[in-house]
Amino acid sequence: MKVTISKILGTDHQSGVATPAVTRIALSGTPVMNNTFDLYAQLDFLLPGIFGSREFFKREYADAIDRDQDTVKIEALRKLTAPFILRRTKSQVARDLPEKTEWYCGAKWALHRKRSTMRSGTASAPACS
């Protein structure tokens, strides 16, 4: 099951956390670089309760780090989360990456089809040929 968990108040995050699982894995491009609540959402999904309540995390870490750039809190959060994070930079994995491939696939829909699917919320992208 794929769940987008970056928004802690979102229904995807809430349903992901509520789903019983033997193993959970979270992947992210930049969990700490966006803001501390992205990290909270991912680790709360993986290890519920690791940071205590959302309010405690906000008061203890998020405000101090996001607003004040508190280096003591940054280091404390880094030490707490380090065992659960594998961080590899682009330079470390660049040799393993394939060449960049791009392609454009356009599709023409009849105007009435676009309008009806957009209104009903059932629009899906047509297959490329």
Image: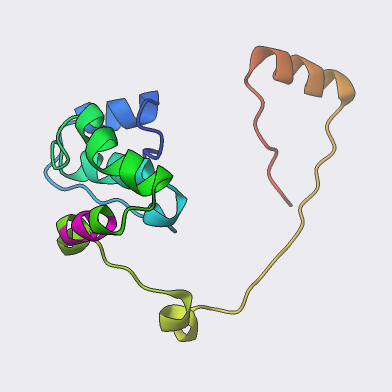
Residue 2 locus on image (x, y percent): 36, 41
Residue 75 locus on image (x, y percent): 24, 61
Name the quadrant of the N terminus. Answer: top left
The front one of 96 and 84 is 84
Residue 63 appears in which quarter of the rendering? top left
Residue 17 appears in which quarter of the rendering? top left
Task: Provide the major secondary structure of the magenta segment.
Answer: helix
Q: Is residue 115 left or right of residue 5?
A: right
| Residue found at x 76% / y 52% | 105
Q: Is residue 19 left or right of residue 27?
A: left
Task: Name, please, the residue furthest toward the bottom.
Answer: 95
Residue 66 locus on image (x, y percent): 40, 46
* Region in magenta: 74-79
The total number of labels drawn is 0
The front one of 15 and 84 is 84
When the figure is inspected, residue 101 is found, relative to residue 19, above or below; the finding is: below
Residue 93 appears in which quarter of the rendering? bottom left
| Residue found at x 80% / y 42% | 107
Task: Name, please, the residue furthest toward the right.
Answer: 111
| Residue found at x 71% / y 13% | 119
- The answer to whether residue 28 is magenta is no
When the figure is inspected, residue 23 is found, relative to residue 54, above or below; the finding is: below
- Can the viewer see residue 28 in this picture? no
- Can the viewer see residue 91 in this picture? yes
The front one of 103 and 29 is 29
| Residue found at x 35% / y 31% | 8
